[in-house]
Amino acid sequence: MAGQAGLAILAFWLIPYIVKKLGSEGYALYSLLGIVSGYLMLLSLGAGNATVKYVSEHLGSGDRGALRAVLGTSLWMHAFGVCLGAAAVLVFRQEVAHLLKVEPASLKLAVWVMACASVGGVCFALAQYGQNVLQGLQRYDLSNTLSLLQAGLFLGSVALLLWRGCGILAIGGAFVVINAVVGLAALASALHFLPVYPAWDFWLESGRKPFRDFLIFSITGFVGLLSWSVIFQWDKLFIGCMLPLSQLTYYMMPSAILQKFWIIPSTITTVAFPMLSELHGAKDAAGVRRFYRRCSQLVIWLVVPGFVMLMVLAPQFLTLWLGEEFSRYGTWPLRLLAMGNFFYFMGVMPGVAVGGLGRIQYGVKAGVALALMCLFLWTFLIPRLGIVGAAWGFFLASLLVNGVFILCANRDFFSMSGREYFEDVCLRPFLAGAVLLAVAWMIHFWLGSWTSFLLGGGLCAAVYIGLVLLLIDHDNYESLKEVLAVLR
């Protein structure tokens, strides 16, 4: 968490400088490096989580033959699909650039970016393989260090290259070099701590069962991963294909801001999942229901203030951080994406809870439905409303699908009606959010400088903390103290 906070501060400091130096079109090309390599990682077919699970499991059982088989299977899955996709991007890089509606003056740069993204994507996959193995070995210190270095070095290198007068050509080269270095370091670290090396004849090593189990788990997880990728990444692909590439930059900023909010629900769900599983194994239905209610309300308590502040203060924040142009184009996408993410976060806890009860396919189906709804709405709205249409599509899909999913999960697994869920879980945080919204709206006209913005934000934070202490019930007060203890 300290590393992620450091990266957030670094990005907050450097991104305005990078945007100013590259311009909207240049920043969009710069963003494609990460977007393309991220899409290429999908071709590993969910091998990442399967690697963490089975490396840990076979180390615990002491089955070295199965461990060798898993390591070999994972290495091939990380390498083969990604290399095949990278080769396709490399061969058809000019056609992809045309598909993304790159301006003629930037076409050569876009072709270079595609080439760097394809080669860097292979190196990125190698780094992911090493980091997943390290997580399976429970060497989170090394895995996190490599991940933070990968992101921090690239961001810092981009700013340094721009300061030295270099452009997108040098940035593309730096992307390849940094991912190659981190990839080799991750692989070397993993091999150093492993008690065995990967088996190349993995389908024969220790029988076919480890290979088959790994593949089934990987492909099943890939369905959920693909749904998540569609929901949170394909909107950018649609924008790149349907609109001028410069519009992607104005959309990327709100999207990047909201990604920082993921640390809040993930902090709770990481702890809640095994606890719910334990209660379920003990057949304590009342305990499961009570714990689920506490965690669901706690998620809402923690995310409400951030989303309310974004809704009200989006124009002021974007103007102060990135300038009036970004505020003009990005305010409503930021607001709509914030509302969509809020409803998505409300559905995260029910999804984790049903997984803890052994019904993970229930949440996967909801994810697939949300992805399909997003695709349908983006196809219809983006050509008509531009990047605002992309944000509208995600918001409407999240509201409809997660609303139905929350109601059905509460009814089927926790014997909780919609009215009971609203009164027990949502009502108090929503009341506090409504008061905070009114306070923020009354003062937002005066927040025209960083000093006044920070003072206004501090006032709103104090108001919300007071409302929490006034309205929160005893159970959730104890839960909040536990979460704060974990954060410390």
Image: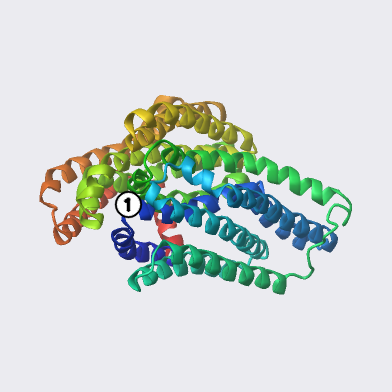
User: Which of 183 and 97 lies nearest the eye of the viewer?
Assistant: 97
User: Where in the figure is residue 50, as x and y percent of width and height?
Assistant: 68, 51
Work out whether residue 82 can be spotted.
yes
Give the residue pinned by disc 1. Answer: 24
Which secondary structure, mark 1? helix
Quadrant position of residue 76? bottom right
Q: Is residue 362 left or right of residue 304?
A: right
Q: Residues within 10 Å of mark 1 (few under 14, many from 20)?
A: some
Q: Is residue 345 left or right of residue 446?
A: right
User: Where in the figure is residue 209, as x and y percent of width and height?
Assistant: 84, 48
- For the point 45% across and 48% down, the residue is 265
User: Which of 221 and 381 lies nearest the eye of the viewer?
Assistant: 381
Q: Is residue 166 left or right of residue 458?
A: right
Q: Is residue 354 above or below residue 124?
A: above
Question: How many numbered marks have been drawn onto this rendered protein structure?
Answer: 1
Work out whether residue 406 can be spotted.
no
- The extreme left residue here reads 446
Specify the quadrant that holds the C terminus.
Answer: bottom left
Q: Is residue 209 above or below residue 346?
A: below
Quadrant position of residue 244? top left
Instruction: Identify residue type, mark 1.
Output: Ser
User: Where in the figure is residue 411, as x and y percent of width and height?
Assistant: 52, 26
User: Where in the figure is residue 62, as x and y percent of width and height?
Assistant: 81, 63
Q: How is the model colour-coded?
A: rainbow
- For the point 28% across and 44% down, the residue is 330
Specify the quadrant that holds the N terminus.
Answer: bottom left
